[in-house]
Image (tube, helix red, strand yellow):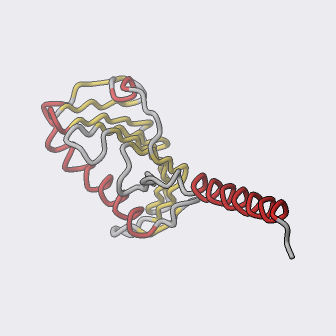
Amino acid sequence: MVNRKTLVVAVTVIVAVAAVGVGVYLATQGGGGTKNTYTVANAKSLQIETNVTEQGVTVTHKWAAKNLNSTQLLLRFDLLGGEAGNYSYILIPSNQTAWSAVNGAWTDASSSFSSVWSAWDPHWSNLVNELVANWSGTGDHNYTASNGASVKVYKIVINPALADSMFQP
């Protein structure tokens, strides 16, 4: 027959083991509350690099976007290694502000915002849509664009802290 002292010790050990198990479970599950898992689809900011190869020429694009999924989008992209040098663009759709630079010399292109936006927004949107639909969530992603270009997407960072100065000339 089990004595009372042995029974109390056994129950205490069982309760302690259960408490530790519950604590470990909650810690690995984000405390039991709603876990914020960010993906490309729900990101607040995004930084991406691509190598786009078309007709034997590869151009590196560095994309950065802030305030995604809001009316205050800030978009910057740099095209490196093009035939005529390096190009940079800053686009702010909310106030139709556009800046462009060739080899670091910035020009206010806001008077041409609509044409600049209509030229580059499809590239940005297609890139994001491709990642949302087909990227595994880790590592690089390769695909063929609708125009036949080979695209390697790498250095994908979801929710990086992007300084406001990055979106100013």
Position of 102 with respect to 49 (left or right) is left
Total numbered labels: 0
Identify the residue at the far bottom of this view. 1
Q: Which image quarter: residue 63?
A: top left
Q: Nearer the viewer, residue 134 or 109?
A: 134
Is residue 166 placed above or below 50 in the rendered structure?
A: above
The residue shown at (85%, 72%) is: 2
Position of 23 with respect to 131 (left or right) is right
The residue shown at (84%, 63%) is: 6
The residue shown at (17%, 30%) is: 110
> Whole-percent x and y of residue 167?
34, 29
Q: Nearer the viewer, residue 123 or 68?
A: 68
> Whole-percent x and y of residue 21?
67, 60
> Whole-percent x and y of residue 160?
47, 39
Is residue 30 placed above or below 147 in the rendered structure?
A: above
The residue shown at (41%, 25%) is: 104
Q: Nearer the viewer, residue 153 or 106?
A: 153
For the C terminus, give its image quadrant. Answer: top left
Is residue 139 placed above or below 89 in the rendered structure?
A: below
For the N terminus, give its image quadrant. Answer: bottom right
